[in-house]
């Protein structure tokens, strides 16, 4: 018997309005998936607030998601990695509304190379993001557009994988993904940081001396998905001043939702000092170092990077 996303959300105890919101997100993912197969890989001729060149697909994915979040009438505040300010939707503002932070197409620069990329969503109850921590998320979603299109979600009761089938349904392919405490794969981002940070260099050498297997694609959605699907691994992205004094990856759009998904699979996630999910959001586009994956591997990183 096929387990569809809608019924799984219901059986997993979701509030109806959260289930509807996640189904709208899944709907947006189907349209983005279609565009990725057919769409224009070219540049949009615009830049986001970081001065990063936007691809036509970045802009299109952002529009598709924004439209779906608006039309579902359940979201009051939206912040997109591709836009510089929060959008306030016209919806009745009561405790039943949600705020959604998303990265419409993480790793989009990889799309022309046909590597896997993703759409990442963090869902909070109530209005706004500033001053909150990731512990307040009620759900996180990671859609990976690869050889198959998959959707991982958590609502705080495990992390579950669905695969888009040929009639446009997301069907359950793995329930309660679990990470072992020990990693054997490593995904070392920002290797350039080893030039200015001997501790990171020592850590990289440790993994190579221990003959860990390198699994790093340059797309965080796919790299975190790899750790979750393999049931072990460690992903690191340390800071390297002056370019990335706080690291490159964003707390709100990438680090919080991935940390929720990984913690719910028995892993952990740290900025080197505290859990990512305990960090207070001070700014929409706040960046943070991130060390995420198998528990003992994260502990080792914290120990060696102190
Ligand atoms: P680098 C993609 O641009 C991204 O935001 C993440 O998906 C990815 O992990 C990281 O940047 C890659 O950064 O420095 O390896 O290009």
Image: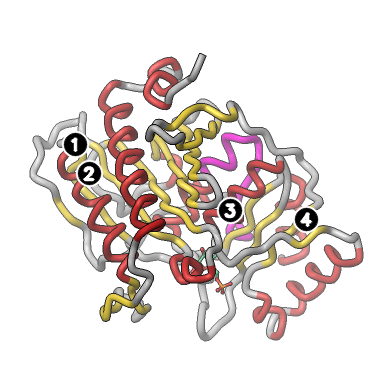
Q: CA distance from mark 2 to mark 4?
A: 40 Å
How far separated are the C-alphas under marks 3 and 1?
35 Å
Q: Which residue is at the front of the view, 191 or 302?
A: 191
The numbered mark, 2 or 3, whose residue comes first in the sequence reads: 2
Q: Which of marks 1 and 3 precedes in the sequence?
A: 1
Q: Does dot 1 land on a helix, a strand or a loop? A: loop
Q: Nearer the viewer, mark 4 or mark 1?
A: 1
The answer to whether the residue bearing label 4 lies less than 8 angstroms from the nearest atom of ligand 1 is: no
Residue 300 numbered mark, or none: 4
The residue where tag 2 is placed is 69
Disc 2 residue lies near ligand 1 with CB under 8 A: no
What residue would you read off at disc 1? 72
Please state the horizontal and vertical placement of residue 239, each as a whole percent of the image.
58, 73
Pointers 2 and 3 in contact (CB under 8 A)? no
Closer to the eye: label 4 or 3: 4
Magenta segment boundaries in residue numbering: 260-273
Identify the residue shown where x is 32% and y is 33%.
23
Residue 84, position in %: x, y?
25, 68
Quarter of the C terminus within the rendering: bottom right
Query: Where does residue 189 sit, x and y in percent of width and height?
Result: 64, 68
Which secondary structure, mark 4? helix
Between circles 2 and 3, the one closer to the viewer is 2
The answer to whether the residue labelled 2 contacts the one labelled 1, judged by CB atoms less than 8 Å apart, is yes
Residue 23 is covered by the magenta coloring = no
Residue displayed at 21% across by 29% down: 96
Q: Please name whichever residue, 268 or 175, is drawn nearer the observer in this view of the structure.
A: 175
């Amino acid at each position: 018997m096929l387990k569809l996303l809608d019924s799984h959300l219901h059986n997993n105890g979701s509030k109806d309005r959260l289930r509807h919101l996640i189904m709208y997100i899944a709907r947006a993912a189907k349209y983005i998936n279609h565009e990725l197969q057919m769409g224009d890989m070219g540049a949009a001729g615009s830049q986001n607030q970081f001065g990063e060149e936007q691809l036509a697909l970045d802009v299109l994915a952002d529009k598709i998601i924004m439209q779906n979040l608006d039309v579902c009438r359940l979201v009051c505040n939206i912040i997109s990695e591709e836009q510089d300010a929060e959008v306030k939707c016209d919806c009745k503002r009561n405790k039943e509304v949600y705020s959604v932070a998303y990265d419409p197409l993480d790793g989009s620069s990889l799309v022309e190379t046909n590597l896997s990329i993703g759409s990442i969503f963090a869902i909070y109850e109530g209005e706004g993001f500033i001053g909150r921590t990731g512990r307040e998320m009620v759900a996180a979603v990671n859609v990976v557009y690869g050889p198959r299109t998959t959707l991982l979600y958590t609502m705080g009761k495990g992390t579950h994988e669905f695969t888009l089938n040929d009639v446009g349904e997301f069907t359950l392919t793995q329930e309660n993904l679990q990470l072992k405490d020990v990693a054997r794969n490593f995904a070392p981002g920002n290797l350039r940081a080893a030039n200015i940070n001997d501790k990171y260099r020592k850590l990289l050498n440790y993994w190579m001396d221990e003959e860990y297997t390198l699994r790093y694609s340059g797309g965080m959605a796919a790299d975190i998905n790899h750790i979750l699907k393999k049931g072990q691994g460690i992903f690191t992205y340390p800071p390297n001043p002056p370019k990335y004094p706080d690291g490159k990856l964003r707390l709100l759009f990438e680090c919080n939702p991935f940390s929720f998904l990984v913690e719910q699979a028995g892993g952990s996630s740290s900025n080197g000092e505290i859990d990512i999910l305990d960090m207070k959001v001070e700014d929409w586009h706040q960046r943070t170092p991130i060390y995420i994956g198998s528990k003992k591997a994260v502990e080792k990183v914290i120990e060696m990077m102190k």
